[in-house]
Image (spheres, rainbow, N blue to C red):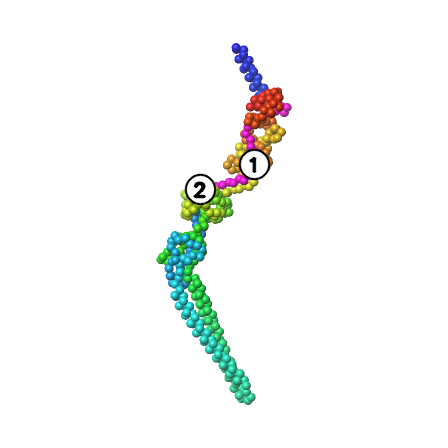
Amino acid sequence: MMWKTRLLIIGVLLFLACNFTLLFMKSEKISRTYYIDEWTAVKKQDLLEMMPAKGVLAPKEEQYLYYESNMGNFNGFLVEKGDEVEAGTALFEYSPEDITQAKEKFKIEKEKLEREQISLENHIQDLEDMQDDLRITTLDDELNQNEYMIQTLERDIYEKELQISRIKNEIEKYEDLIDAADESLLNLTALSEISGTVKSIKHDLTNPIVTIISNIQKIEGTLSEKEIKKAAQGMKVFITPEGSNKKIDGTIEKIYNYPVSEPHADKESHYEFTVVMDEAPEQQSFHGEHVNLKIVTNEVSDTLTVPAKAIKKTKKGKYAYTILQNGQLDKRELQTGLNISQTQEVKEGLQKGELVLLERPLFLKSGSPFITPIEIPKLKKKDLRELGKNDMLKYSARGFLSR
């Protein structure tokens, strides 16, 4: 019995010695077959590096309306706080009485000046007729006297023309005042420029007396000092309202370069930013509701990728092992790029569809043959019958030894 035990121990030691000899021998005539059971294909996909943030829904715009005393006396509000309004809705109005009275005064003054102008023009015509009569003479003495009279009339005509010129300027001024009064009468009612809600009304007429907030929303949020350096205007943003799985696309509209509160040496500053949405939320949303944001800080489109664990690092660089169609492994040197969520971008060294190892066996060498696990469900009786007994024993032994 003892000799059987010793014989078994000697056999095991010889088996191990043979395997270790084959494993460490440097002769290229002896190759080790490796067992591999984890691999994946090189893919093409988009990689997005994202920064999480929080935000709240807010009106995209606000309209402030002011009371202008030169427009007339205030006549009253036509809406109440909380009312929904459309663009063109009347909000408040001025009294037309003062404007109408002023317009009548302007018209009276204009008509008075027009009558004065007509009178002066008639007077000039009379003076010119007198000049014509004086020019018709035959005697020398009368000619000299008439010349003096003609010059005197000429000065009178010139003065009257100057008066008419001043009157015309006055008439134009009153015409402008009348036009302004007409325009004021047309603008007695202040209108909303946007669709939205009446946010506030000030009955004491302190400006702005009416504030309208739009129904269209934007998002307001804050970022820390470190986060604000990663963000930039125009970056894509994925928006998810709280309590919803619906994602909405958006864009950073503006980043404010001053903190939201007074900066302090012992306190981190935060900076406001706004996001515009490509579409409105599906469900009814209220100003002030919270949303979750993912800001796309880096993006690579249609790039080659592999799982990060397939990449091996050395002092010389990065590499991965690919599975060749001839049943051997090939070591590839790689140039990598973006690494996001255990997914590695590969810029050079691999092609789409190539198979790469996920886990590297010990002592792996480039050009080594390999075997993979048998997939029993895929075996067919026909395939087994075509495989001879010697081949079956050979492949079984190779699989046992490789493992």
Identify the magenta region: 27-52
Residue on which disc 1 sits: 43
Q: Which one is nearer the viewer's eye here, 164 or 370?
A: 370
* Residue found 56% across the figure and 36% down from its top: 43
With 36 as the anchor, is 290 left or right in this view? Answer: left
* Residue found 59% across the figure and 20% down from its top: 393
Secondary element at tag 2: loop
* Residue found 37% across the figure and 61% down from its top: 75
Residue on which disc 2 sits: 244
Q: Position of residue 322 (x, y in %)?
A: 59, 31
Query: Does residue 232 appear in the picture of this structure?
Result: no
**What is the spatial separation of the Cα atoms under label 2 and label 1, in whole angstroms?**
31 Å
Q: Which one is nearer the viewer's eye here, 373 or 71?
A: 373
Q: Quadrant of residue 19?
A: top right
Above-or-below relation of 291 to 186: above
Query: Does residue 101 appear in the picture of this structure?
Result: yes
Badge 1 density bin: few <14, some 14–19, many ≥20, Cα 10 Å: many
Q: Comparing marks 2 and 1, which lies closer to the viewer?
A: 2
Q: Is residue 103 magenta?
A: no
Q: Amino acid at mark 1?
A: Lys
Q: Residue furthest toward the left?
A: 204
Q: Is residue 39 magenta?
A: yes
